[in-house]
């Protein structure tokens, strides 16, 4: 996996299993770009909506198979479907270590874990948006046993729909996402519940700060529960850091939080060889891949990284 040239291969077809907001948006974006894409969902309405977007409905899965299903059913999503034994399998799940353990055991080096950092509090096929991934970060797991060629196939799909690819390990992903996704969901729920306890007057006066701070609590509770419970250890550690912050003098806390949120670091373009160590260093520095070349990728890192 170290620095050898990896030839550019013809773009394989894509099969998306689960045609809700993420899977349906991905399939629609690929179909709109002229990429061969098929899809399947247990919900006939989701299948009909995807077909209207130009997606071929099929239970025959080939090329790159994308699992865009809820975490609790990730392991059984392919049951009853016919998958090409040479297909690359990836997922869009918000937790990676448990998914890697289950799907990695089933598919070996054919599996590449992924998680696009996008979506809204809405869900289902009525929330499909082909532009959903434009400008989004797409975490893509690069483990010691990951087949780099397969990793690149999935990376090229992410890039083709406008996302930027962040190379990570599953454990690094789960630690990071606990801090910036799982904990915000819990804080939004706590803020809404506490405001409810404050009574109807408080809720009637709620405006922008409350709306912005509680937006994600409108997400499907089953999704949020799976997110936080599936990543319980890192989420608990991240929540402990928040509790420690809340115990600080309030003026210091506000000043430090303001500084982090308003920092505007520039970007420095980089070219990185197709090497696991170099790619992971890019992700750890806060950078992302934006373009695939023959034996390199182009991307960026924050200024000073």
Image (cartoon, rainbow, N blue to C red):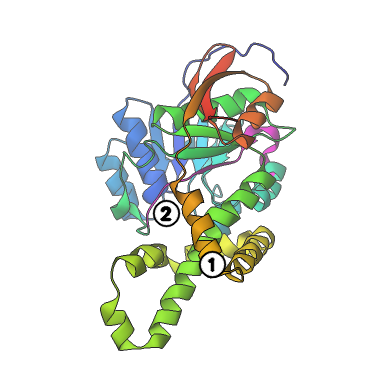
- Is residue 83 found inside the magenta-colored segment of the image? no
Q: Residue at x 51, y 66 (%)?
A: 251
The quarter of the picture where residue 149 lies is top right
Q: Is residue 194 above or below residue 36?
A: below
Look at mark 2 in the image and give the residue it sits on: 42
Q: Secondary structure at mark 2?
A: loop
The answer to which of 261 and 150 lies nearer the viewer is 261
Where in the figure is residue 216, as x and y percent of width and height?
Answer: 41, 62
Q: How many marks?
A: 2
Near mark 2 (Cα within 10 A), the count class, few <14, some 14-19 or many ≥20, is: few
Where in the figure is residue 43, as x and y percent of width and height?
Answer: 37, 56
The answer, for residue 93, to whether it is visible in the render is yes
Look at mark 1 in the image and give the residue it sits on: 225
Q: Secondary structure at mark 1?
A: helix
Q: Earlier in the sequence, mark 2 or mark 1?
A: 2
Q: Residue at x 54, y 60 (%)?
A: 182
Near mark 1 (Cα within 10 A), the count class, few <14, some 14-19 or many ≥20, is: some
The answer to which of 21 and 248 lies nearer the viewer is 248
Q: Is residue 253 left or right of residue 275?
A: left
Q: Is residue 96 above or below residue 130?
A: below
Closer to the eye: label 2 or 1: 1
The disc label shown at residue 126, or none: none
Which residues fall within the magenta stretch? 106-120
The answer, for residue 219, to whether it is visible in the render is no
Q: Is residue 177 left or right of residue 105?
A: left
């Amino acid at each position: 996996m170290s620095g050898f040239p990896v030839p550019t291969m013809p773009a394989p077809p894509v099969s998306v299993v689960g045609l809700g907001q993420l899977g349906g948006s991905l399939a629609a974006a690929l179909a709109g770009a002229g990429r061969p894409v098929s899809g399947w969902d247990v919900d006939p309405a989701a299948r009909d909506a995807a077909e209207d977007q130009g997606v071929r409905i099929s239970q025959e899965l080939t090329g790159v198979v994308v699992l865009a299903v809820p975490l609790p059913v990730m392991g059984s999503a392919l049951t009853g479907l016919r998958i090409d034994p040479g297909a690359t399998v990836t997922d869009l799940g918000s937790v990676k270590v448990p998914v890697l353990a289950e799907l990695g055991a089933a598919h070996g080096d054919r599996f590449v874990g992924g998680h696009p950092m996008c979506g809204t509090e809405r869900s289902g096929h009525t929330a499909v948006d082909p532009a959903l991934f434009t400008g989004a970060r797409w975490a893509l797991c690069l483990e010691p046993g990951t087949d780099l060629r397969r990793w690149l196939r999935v990376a090229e799909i992410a890039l083709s729909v406008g996302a930027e690819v962040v190379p990570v390990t599953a454990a690094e992903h789960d630690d990071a996402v606990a801090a910036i996704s799982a904990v915000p969901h819990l804080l939004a729920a706590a803020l809404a519940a506490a405001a409810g306890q404050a009574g109807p007057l408080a809720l009637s006066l709620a405006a922008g700060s409350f709306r912005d701070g509680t937006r994600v609590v409108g997400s499907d509770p089953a999704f949020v529960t799976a997110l936080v419970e599936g990543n319980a250890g890192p989420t608990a550690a991240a929540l402990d850091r928040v509790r420690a912050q809340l115990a600080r003098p309030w003026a210091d806390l506000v000043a430090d939080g303001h500084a982090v949120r308003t920092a505007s670091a520039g970007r420095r373009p980089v070219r990185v060889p197709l090497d696991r160590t170099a790619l992971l260093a890019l992700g750890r520095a806060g950078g992302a891949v934006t373009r695939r070349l023959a034996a390199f990728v182009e991307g960026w890192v924050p200024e000073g990284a």
